[in-house]
Image (cartoon, grey):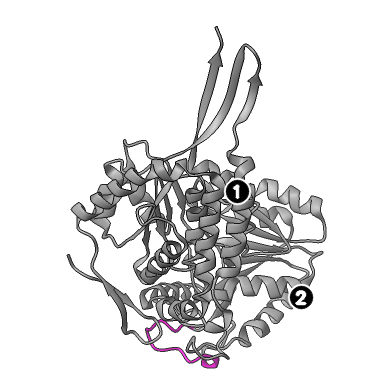
Amino acid sequence: MKPIQLISPVDGSVYAERTPLTQEAAVAAVARAKAAQKGWAARPLAERIALVKAGVAKLNEQTDEIVKEIAWQMGRPTRYGGEFGGVNARTDYMSQIAEATLAPHVIEDSDKFRRYLAREPVGVVFIVAPWNYPYLTTINTLAPALIAGNTVVLKHASQTMLVGERLAEAFYAAGIPADVFQNVVLDHATTEHLIATRSFGFVNFTGSVGGGQAMERAAAGTFTPLGLELGGKDPGYVRADANLDAAVDTLMDGAMYNAGQCCCGIERIYVHESLYDAFVEKAVKWVSGLKLGNPFDATTTIGPMANKRFAALVRSQIAEAIAAGAKPLIDPKLFPEDDGGAYLAPQILVHVDHSMRVMMEESFGPVVGIMKVKDDAEAIRLMNDSPYGLTASIWTQDYETAQDIGRQIETGTVFMNRADYLDPALCWTGCKDTGRGGSLSYLGFHSVTRPKSYHLKKV
């Protein structure tokens, strides 16, 4: 098998290399997971919860090393630390609601009938995780899947393939059996073979639309449930009554944090005409204060993109938009780009419209287009003019207005006066090309379990 290389965006070096499993070895790994599942599900719920939380605690003990590894693997500046604040919060919340969510829903319990709805683990859960938030996105499904009594096979993105090894190391140290949680390195052909042969009770994939389509093709005819989170082109809308400074600070952070490589990052902004000029001026000042550089430098606020091919896509979108009439507002000389490499200067574009790729296709990089709108109706029309539907950020002083606009937007999450955030109590979901299914909240347990009805009669 040809080795898979992890090319670091920091310096272009080969940071890690792993040989993928053969098809036979992959099939054997799934068989071990299936064999271990019934025994794992038979353990008391409280014991499974305790072991998952212990695994996350072991992960926290490796924070210093992991922060450096993340920087080498995908370029995030070390000043921002790891992802364990969110990992801990999500694990704790899903643990907290597990007993009530997984408990049988009793319809009748009398001397004649016992009728109830139960939830049963789906068996083996397959997680195909992305590189941009490699621990957070994995834990969204990993924690509830194990807590609910499933076994898990994890295939991490090649750009962050050391993350799966770290997770396995931590969970094994906490006492979770090796066959209950397995980290594997697979090529595309073997991944598709496993899905096509109905190896899993549920497949969770986070990645591109093309990747999601490949997952659906592989699963065709197997009736395997799929959870697909395929990115977005998330809008922000700044109304006339918005707190301008708060809107600038949050929306620009949402556009530029992690070099713009956030599933729910802000990629397009619509501003009421009364605030447009002031918003743009403040936004330019905000972005100009960033520092692009080596992620190990404590003063760096924006590091390289995870791969030079990702940066090339953003460069092409920006160049095409400028050629079509868009105006760039950030002087590239403020930022030391490497020509054609992974280090990409942030950019704000105005005079943009929806004929431009940069306003319609996912950029997943440090660029945002800003458009002027005259009212809510125009903003709603533009926000919905997208193949994606993950989150939308509305800036207003009024709950009712935000709710009314939110009802008219085709999106999975509606934010008011915040952006780029996951609340573990709320379902993480999307519509249109963003995919289907949901994680986190009590519905996250529904993804990794199936309903089972009991209708028991005494005669």
Q: Is residue 410 magenta?
A: no
- In the picture of the structure, the residue carrying the numbered disc 1 is 410
Relative to residue 428, is residue 378 drawn left or right? right
Of residues 66 and 14, the one nearer the viewer is 66
Name which quarter of the figure residue 35 lies in.
top left
The disc labelled 2 sits on which kind of residue?
Answer: Asp
Of residues 314 and 325, the one nearer the viewer is 314
Residue occupying image coordinates x 79% and y 64%: 240
Label 1 crowding class (10 Å Cα cut-off): few <14, some 14-19, many 20+? many
Query: Does residue 89 sit above or below 325 in this rendering?
Result: above
Q: Main secondary structure of the magenta part?
A: loop
Q: Which residues are magenta?
A: 333-344
Return the disc, 1 or 2, that comes first in the chain's sequence.
2
Counting from the top left corner in percent of width and height, residue 68 is at 46, 82
Q: Which circle marks residue 184 in the picture?
A: none
Of residues 81 and 168, the one nearer the viewer is 168
The disc labelled 1 sits on which kind of residue?
Answer: Glu
Query: Does residue 196 sit above or below 235 in this rendering?
Result: above
Residue occupying image coordinates x 60% and y 46%: 98
Of residues 213 and 276, the one nearer the viewer is 213
Q: Is residue 334 magenta?
A: yes
Counting from the top left corner in percent of width and height, residue 242 is at 79, 66
- In the picture of the structure, the residue carrying the numbered disc 2 is 245
Q: Secondary structure at mark 2?
A: helix
Q: Quadrant of the C terminus?
A: top right
Instruction: Farthest residue to the top: give it.
Output: 459
